[in-house]
Amino acid sequence: MKKERKHQFYKRYIKRPMDIVLSFIALLALSPVILAVALLVRIKLGSPVIFKQKRPGLNEKIFTIYKFRTMTDKRDKKGNLLPDEERLTGFGKFLRSTSLDELPELFNVLKGDMSIVGPRPLLTEYLPYYTESEKQRHSVRPGLTGLAQINGRNNVGWDERLAYDIEYVNNINFINDIAIIMNTVKKVILKSDVNVCTSDEGNLALIRSKQAG
């Protein structure tokens, strides 16, 4: 019971202030990198430099996530955007494999849209396809990284990935968060468990609609 009270205290009173401090420090420390990446994105991929997309956050409240752009705006003869695979450049793949494309999300953390650690914010179109248990992932702020990201990232199936999210939600504490942060740094440096594929094979809505059909 005492241990549970400690975890609740951390979740309610420590986690958010820690997010603010860590994201602010990270933005200051990484500002040269952020500016350099922004300049390279502008040169190699054009404008806008920042990719914005609506994602569901805490209590399924929709917010705008910020990432560095990784794809071009190439279109076919009819003016339609080409498939993602054809618009994702070598530079874009590099940004994704190193997680540099996610640096602008530190502003989301500072704003309160996200946390340093939590279930990753997925597409809004996935909301109808979660089980009742999986919906718990929206009872906390989404994170820059999470338990699923240090256990296979997007190389594991959706059922397993979402199960890791629920496991995290049910066991939020300071030690776990620090361990996840440290493991994330290690994986980013080693570029392990990285998959930059953009095909529909990884689309949760497509997979579960097929299963239901």
Image: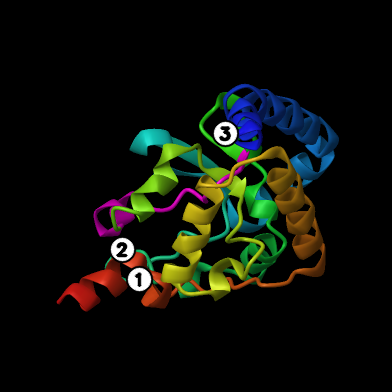
Q: Are the two marked residues, 3 and 1, in contact with CB atoms closer than 8 angstroms?
A: no
> Which region shows up in magenta?
116-130
Label 3 vs 1, first from the N-terminus: 1
- Estimate how packed mark 1 is, as few (under 14), some (14 to 19) or many (20 or more) residues with alpha carbons within 10 Å: few
Is residue 50 placed above or below 152 in the rendered structure? above
- Mark 1 lies on a secondary structure that is loop
Position in image of residue 189 (x %, y %): 82, 62
Q: Nearer the viewer, mark 3 or mark 1?
A: 3
Is residue 67 placed above or below 209 in the rendered structure? above
- How far, Cα to Cα, is label 2 from label 3? 33 Å
Q: Is residue 34 left or right of residue 199?
A: right
Q: Which residue is mark 3?
A: 108
Position in image of residue 177 (x %, y %): 69, 44
Instruction: Using the image as rendered, state which of residue 19 and residue 102 is in the foreground.
Output: 19
Identify the residue shown where x is 55% and y is 36%: 114
- Estimate how packed mark 3 is, as few (under 14), some (14 to 19) or many (20 or more) residues with alpha carbons within 10 Å: many
**Amino acid on which disc 2 is placed:** Gly
- How far, Cα to Cα, is label 2 from label 1? 5 Å
Q: Which residue is mark 2?
A: 79
Q: Which residue is mark 1?
A: 76
Identify the residue shown where x is 56% and y is 51%: 168
Q: Are the two marked residues, 2 and 1, in contact with CB atoms closer than 8 angstroms?
A: yes
Identify the residue shown where x is 22% and y is 77%: 210
